[in-house]
Amino acid sequence: MATSPGTVVSSSVSSVFFSTQPAPTCPMFDGDQYKCDVIVGIRKTVASLSLIGCLFMIAVIWLFRKYRSFVQRLILYLSIAAMLDDVSYLMGDLHPDGTLCNFQAFLLTFFEWSVLLWVCCITFNLTLNIIWMTRTDKYEIVYHVLSWGVPLILSCLPFIGNHYGPAGAWCWIPNQYTHWRFGIWYGPLFCLLGVMVVVYTCITVTLNRKVKRWEGTYDPDVERNKDLLKEDIKPLRAYPFIYLALSIFPLVHRIQNAISPDNTVFALVVLHALTSPLQGMVNAIVYGLDRETIVRLTPTSIKVHVTFFFIL
């Protein structure tokens, strides 16, 4: 899940960065502060757990030097983006319109886009691996430019005309700027998710066909393809699916919000707050259940690698 010449410019910049309005009360649910506190509490709790999950994945990849593998580096980059996204979620109090609110909205937009684009890069990598049996290591720099550069540009656009501000129980693009919400985030998100669903379906069908075709045969090319499947495809294929699954409730909430902006559904906001920051935690569970990771996560193995890590 995540915003004009002379005096006008000065006034706009001042309102974006130096507003000193008092702390707002709950802007939703007819001012029911308890419900807003519940939403903020859920969001912060899940973000905290997700942050711990991201730190776990980063620590394991770094401690066991898994980053030497391109596939593990892709997981590392996704984990870093998700970790920083969780930091923006942890800032999710009811901030007044001003510097802190705009900064949180900027971070949220930037890292939501970064997580999405790293998932897209992983999906692209899987597509080339499975359908064309080609490695994509040579695109690593391109992935970085895409997954950090594009979010930076898009997250800066809402500063034009001061389109960041309080947006319900957190700061983002306010409800009255629906066209900005869908132009900056939800429109591209719909398109990319649709493409990922189609591509992921093709990947699954193609993979199942190839596995059945390889059964009971021995051929050097087939064995190389099996090694590619084991090393490059299996560790990555869960992450696009996790992102797609966790995007459902935020999308449903924002569609309902666009159709009926004056009718906030508490259950949808709760589900949105619960699933938006969940990426890191679910990723960590999937990563921790990997057989190779389980084998390495023993006290003896951790002690040996910690000692070896600091010696070198």
Image (spheres, grey):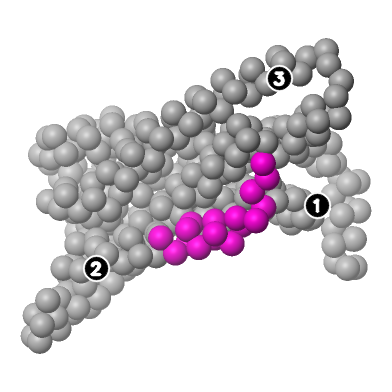
Reading the image, the residue beneath label 2 is 159
Q: Position of residue 194 (x, y in %)?
A: 37, 33
Nearest to the observer: residue 204 or residue 33? 204
Label 1 or label 3, whichever lies nearer to me, is: 3
Checking the image for residue 192, the label placed there is none
Structural crowding at the residue carrying mark 1, measured as other residues with C-alpha within 10 Å and reported as few (<14), some (14–19) or many (≥20): some
Q: From the image, which quarter does the N terminus lie in? A: top left
Q: Does the magenta-highlighted stretch encompass residue 32? A: no
Is 263 situated left or right of 214 in this image? left
Nearest to the observer: residue 241 or residue 249? 241
Q: From the image, which quarter does the C terminus lie in? A: bottom right
Residue 91 quadrant: bottom left
Reading the image, the residue beneath label 1 is 64
Reading the image, the residue beneath label 3 is 211
Describe the element under mark 1 as helix, strand or loop: loop
**Label 1 is placed on what type of residue?**
Phe
Q: Does the magenta-highlighted stretch encompass residue 142? A: yes
Residue 285 at least partly seen: no
Label 2, label 3: how many angstroms apart (C-alpha)?
Answer: 50 Å
Label 1, label 3: how many angstroms apart (C-alpha)?
Answer: 30 Å
Instruction: Characterize the magenta stretch by its predominant secondary structure.
Output: helix
Is 160 situated left or right of 209 in this image? left
Q: Residue at x 52, y 36 (%)?
A: 240
Structural crowding at the residue carrying mark 3, measured as other residues with C-alpha within 10 Å and reported as few (<14), some (14–19) or many (≥20): few
Instruction: Write the start and end of the magenta stretch as one range.
Output: 134-150
**Label 3 is placed on what type of residue?**
Val
